[in-house]
Image (cartoon, rainbow, N blue to C red):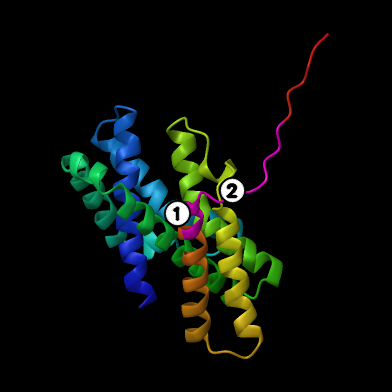
């Protein structure tokens, strides 16, 4: 089930990334690269940091074809996607929690400390979007006051907490996914925000 959700998530991320590339007037190569970076970049950054190989897209090159195909499709149906903005926000939230849980699992497999397991989940969930925004010359969503990285951390914490409490991996995945998804969706619905730091230096 997690693998199916992962495929859905990378397709959705690739399609929304294509719109970001389109807003920057990129050609089809740029569209595909932005899609790959967004959908697969989080796991790639994680694997590089933790020296964990092979990359998922090297082991499963079909991921590159799936995401590129989704991005090119998005370029043709961009006007329709704009009308489905809310749906893709929901799918982005789903991708966040799915990527986070997978990131935690990878870190557990290589016996990393708990704090790093949580960090691995957040990197996997958020880094692809950060790379997309940097390449598209936007301020990354991660650095905004939206509850995004926080939702990823909560997802990872719930997942690990249930496992350490003796719950099965299946129960941990479901509950962590539901709680993380609910937090992200509620934050979108009710515009919940994290406290922000505002500093304007005055020169005299």
Instruction: Indicate whether residue 197 is drawn in magenta.
Output: yes
* Whether residue 127 is situated above or below residue 114 in the rendered picture: above
State yes or no: discs 2 and 1 in contact (Cβ < 8 Å): no
At 51% from the left and 78% from the top, the residue drawn is: 175
At 83% from the left and 8% from the top, the residue drawn is: 204
Q: Predominant secondary structure in magenta?
A: loop
Q: Which residue is mark 2?
A: 193
* Whether residue 120 is situated above or below residue 173 in the rendered picture: above
The circle on residue 115 is none
Identify the image quadrant of the N terminus: bottom left
Secondary structure beneath dot 2 equals loop
All told, the count of numbered labels is 2
In the image, taking residue 64 as reference, residue 168 lies left or right, namely right
The circle on residue 189 is 1
Query: Residue 87 in the image: x percent, y percent?
Result: 31, 55
Query: Residue 53 in the image: x percent, y percent?
Result: 50, 64
Residue lying at the far front in this picture: please name it: 190
* Whether residue 157 is situated above or below residue 201 in the rendered picture: below
Instruction: Indicate whether residue 67 is drawn in magenta.
Output: no
In the image, taking residue 32 as reference, residue 89 lies left or right, namely right
At 36% from the left and 73% from the top, the residue drawn is: 3
Residue lying at the far top in this picture: please name it: 204
Residue 59 visible? yes
Tell me which segment is drawn in magenta.
Answer: 186-198
Circle 2 packing at 10 Å, graded few (<14), some (14-19), many (20+), is: few
In the image, taking residue 81 as reference, residue 100 lies left or right, namely right
Query: Residue 62 in the image: x percent, y percent?
Result: 27, 61
Circle 1 packing at 10 Å, graded few (<14), some (14-19), many (20+), is: few
Query: Residue 149 in the image: x percent, y percent?
Result: 57, 54
Residue 51 visible? no
């Amino acid at each position: 089930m997690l693998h199916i959700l992962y495929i859905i998530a990378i397709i959705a991320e690739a399609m929304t990334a294509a719109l970001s590339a389109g807003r920057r007037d990129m050609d089809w190569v740029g569209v595909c690269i932005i899609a790959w970076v967004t959908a697969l970049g989080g796991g790639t950054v994680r694997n590089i940091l933790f020296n964990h190989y092979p990359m998922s897209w090297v082991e499963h090159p079909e991921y590159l074809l799936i995401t590129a195909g989704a991005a090119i499709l998005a370029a043709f149906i961009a006007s329709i996607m704009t009308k489905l903005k809310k749906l893709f926000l929901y799918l982005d939230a789903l991708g966040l929690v799915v990527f986070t849980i997978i990131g935690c699992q990878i870190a557990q497999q290589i016996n990393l400390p708990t704090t790093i397991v949580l960090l691995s989940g957040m990197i996997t969930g958020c880094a692809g979007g950060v790379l997309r925004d940097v390449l598209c010359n936007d301020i990354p969503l991660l650095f905004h006051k939206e509850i995004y990285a926080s939702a990823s951390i909560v997802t990872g914490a719930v997942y690990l907490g249930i496992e350490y409490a003796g719950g099965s991996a299946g129960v941990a995945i479901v509950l962590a996914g539901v709680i993380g998804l609910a937090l992200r969706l509620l934050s979108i619905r009710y515009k919940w925000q994290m406290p922000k730091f505002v500093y304007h230096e005055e020169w005299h």
